Amino acid sequence: MYVRVDIICSAARRTRASDYQEVRESGDPCAVGDVVVGRVAGVGRHGVIETVDGRERPLGVGDVCAVVLGRRYSTAEFHGAIPGRLSAGDRFDLLNIGGIAGRVIPETSAVSDPTVLTYLGHATDEAGKKLSTFDNPIAPDKPGATPAVILVIGSSMDSGKTTSAARIIHMLTGGGVRVGGAKLTGTSRMKDLFRMEAAGAFDTADFLDAGWPSTCGLSSEDLQAVHRALVGRLSGRGIDVIVMEAADGIFERETEYILDCRKIMKDVAIIVACTTDSASAYGMITALAHDHGIVPDFIAGIITSMPLFMEELSQRVTIPFFIDSDSVRERCIRLITGRSAGVR
């Protein structure tokens, strides 16, 4: 049957989902990346949804939405998984603003009362094939030299990673460097890529461009494939440096995989550690050294807007803070050119 879709979420932007969409109840097990259509049964934590143009559209009971099945790991919001199967009338949950949906795992989630949808069916094409985010993954425009990567990591969610990534991009582009922005891990949403573009990134890409609506639960091999896809895409656009953000904190499973993966870390020229305060910064630096043998090149994030926290940390470590200045820009360029032959 065909249904009129009021909202197509941003996580479905690389699919052929349309506002007059054929839907069919699927007897197959649900899969990550499936596009499903549901009617809002109750508005909870997320009262808006990000649409394919990046705008946030308010949700109301009765709205018909095309969303994407995926997992979510969020220490501040929901921990969710995809349903095993969905039948007509079944209820499922909106896991984030970008339109990732599944079922909340209540005992491990920080908040309650998600926005709930009633399943109408899987979105399909004219031949009855289910629409999926894996239908149209990116490919490199043209093979090029591997750019140097500046990896931005955090002690936790909301530690200032995206803000710091944008500052780095702005600083380097102001110095004539051709910069690309990337999100290696997370849960699909366009907001962070828009911030990188607004800061001057020549091009951006994230894990959704490689097919994954979220990276929760991915293996190390999957993460390597996402990394190759993003680097390949951006290197094909003539990028000199990629500012690449990893979601959540360093104890998050996928972030630990990244830090332990030689095939990913060999491209990393600079590590920027974002944190909120002096104690969490010291703990992060200690954990990076103990668990991964890593010393970050810069400390950034919310702490850099707190002079007393910066002073406290400076009494214990000598790692410089990332503050937009000529000296920091020059240090970045020296580190990049000294550690990577890919910079032109």
Image (cartoon, helix red, strand yellow):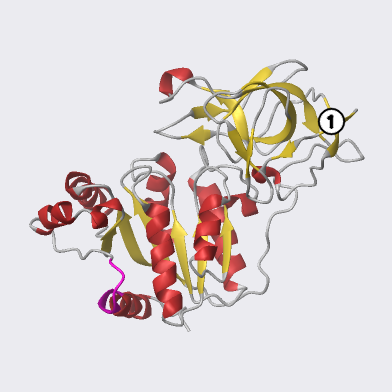
Q: Which residue is situated farthest in the left direction here?
A: 315
Q: Tell me the SS state at disc 1.
A: strand
- Res. 310 image quadrant: bottom left
Which residue is found at the position 73% from the left and 41% from the top? 132
Where residue 139 sits: x, y (%)?
68, 63
Tell which of 132 and 301 is nearer to you.
301
Where residue 77 sits: x, y (%)?
45, 31
The residue type indicated by label 1 comes to: Val
- Res. 129 image quadrant: top right
Which residue is found at the position 54% from the left and 77% from the top? 145
Q: Is residue 148 above or below residue 22?
A: below
Start-end of magenta stretch = 323-328
Can I make out residue 85 in this image? no
Can I make out residue 312 in this image? yes
Where residue 190 sits: x, y (%)?
58, 51
325 magenta-colored: yes
Which residue is found at the position 65% from the left and 44% from the top? 11
Tell which of 117 and 60 is nearer to you.
60
**Counting other residues with Cα less than 10 Å from the Cα at mark 1, is it few (<14), some (14-19), or many (20 or more)?**
many
Tell which of 4 and 265 is nearer to you.
4
Residue on which the image places disc 1:
23
189 left or right, relative to 264 = right
151 magenta-colored: no
Which residue is found at the position 61% from the left and 49% from the top? 208
